[in-house]
């Protein structure tokens, strides 16, 4: 698969200060890329990815150590614009202070947050993100999520979340967490794990959905060099166990990326991620 980024621009946030001491920001990203598959025979076979979106976020102080935060964010324009409405991406309300941040609403799980960035950047979603054959972690935002993010301490930070999974299935829940450790020489270590119970995997059953219990984890390094060069490398693995048949499927994958920026121009070199599936009875 080839990838060519045509436009990538992060719009500056516009801050609006209210008369009752609240702040509101309007922000967004304009990003368009084109990709093609090596399996396609015609050079004209290409697709545009329009990942542009807009959001609104704000906050208001309740006292010296409690700040109310809120955000509503649209989805990507995509191919047909069908999933670009407000509330598609991170949309929540919460509290923050010296003790950390608590949010409730629609957002990424902590593990998926680091799968998505930096280890799926740039354009590796079809392989390292949602492109695997064994869905052992969620690859999108989840509604009905309660999440805690710790403060940024010198050694690092952590995040934990619990989500009501598929509301059509009793007992469907997702537990997710990640830890970021700041190592010497501008190196960050990321560790994450996610467990799902009663995830719907097949809706074709006559009387009940087919479900699975899953467990996945990821370990990665983010290294920043002085010469505007950055290296990302991650390994993730997980399994899915079919609750009706007992069949267990597992898959492992890794991703290596080198990124270099010269002034406002950037270039990425990507080692194609490798997927290694395994089926066990």
Image (spheres, helix red, strand yellow):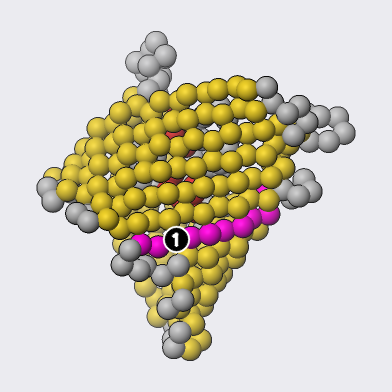
Is 252 rendered above or below residue 262?
above
Q: Residue at x 45, y 37 (%)?
A: 236
Q: Can residue 277 be seen from the camera position used here?
A: yes
Q: Looking at the image, which residue sits at the far top?
A: 41
Residue 102 location in percent, x, y?
Answer: 53, 69
Question: Which residue is pictured at 34% across the width and 50% down the height?
Answer: 189
For label 1, count other residues whose C-alpha is less than 10 Å away and answer few (under 14), some (14-19) or many (20+).
many
- Considering the whole magenta stretch, tell me its main secondary structure: strand
Q: Residue furthest right?
A: 207
**Which residue sits at x=13%, y=51%?**
226
Q: Is the residue 259 above or below the residue 224 in the image?
A: above
In the picture, measured across the screen, residue 164 lies left or right of residue 221, that is right
State the residue position of label 1: 158
Compared with 73, 211 (above or below) is above
Quarter of the image holding residue 213?
top right
Residue located 38% across and 12% down the image? 42
Quick one: 154 or 86, which is closer to the camera? Answer: 154
Q: Quadrant of the C terminus?
A: top right
For the N terminus, the quadrant is: top left
Numbered circles on residues, count:
1
| Left or right side of 267 for 16 | right
* Label 1 element class: strand
Q: Is residue 202 visible?
A: no
**Image coords of residue 262 (percent x, y):** 13, 45
Measured from the top left, where is residue 5 in percent x and y? Answer: 30, 36
Q: Is residue 164 magenta?
A: yes
Percent from the top left, x then y, of residue 92?
56, 64
Q: Magenta segment range?
A: 156-165
37 part of magenta stretch:
no
């Amino acid at each position: 698969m080839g990838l060519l980024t045509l436009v990538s621009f992060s719009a500056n946030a516009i801050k609006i200060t209210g008369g009752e001491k609240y702040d509101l920001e309007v922000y967004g990203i304009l990003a368009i890329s084109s990709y093609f598959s090596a399996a396609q025979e015609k050079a004209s076979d290409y697709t545009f990815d329009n990942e542009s979106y807009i959001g609104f976020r704000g906050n208001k102080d309740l006292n010296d150590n409690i700040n109310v935060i809120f955000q509503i964010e649209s989805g990507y324009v995509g191919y047909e614009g069908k999933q670009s409405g407000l509330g598609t991406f991170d949309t929540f309300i919460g509290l923050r202070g010296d003790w950390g941040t608590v949010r409730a609403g629609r957002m990424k799980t902590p593990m998926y947050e680091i799968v998505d960035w930096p280890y799926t950047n740039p354009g590796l979603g079809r392989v390292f993100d949602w492109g695997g054959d064994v869905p052992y972690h969620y690859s999108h935002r989840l509604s009905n999520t309660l999440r805690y993010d710790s403060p940024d301490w010198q050694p690092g930070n952590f995040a934990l979340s619990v989500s009501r999974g598929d509301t059509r299935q009793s007992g469907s829940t997702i537990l997710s967490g990640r830890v970021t450790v700041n190592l010497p020489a501008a190196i960050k270590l990321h560790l994450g794990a996610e467990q799902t119970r009663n995830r719907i995997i097949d809706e074709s059953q006559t009387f009940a959905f087919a479900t699975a219990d899953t467990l996945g984890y990821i370990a990665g390094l983010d290294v920043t060099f002085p010469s505007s060069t950055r290296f990302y490398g991650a390994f993730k693995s997980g399994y899915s166990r079919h609750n009706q048949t007992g069949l267990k499927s597992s898959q492992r994958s890794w991703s290596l990326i080198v990124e270099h920026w010269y002034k406002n121009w950037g270039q990425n070199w990507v080692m194609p991620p490798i997927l290694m599936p395994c089926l066990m009875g």
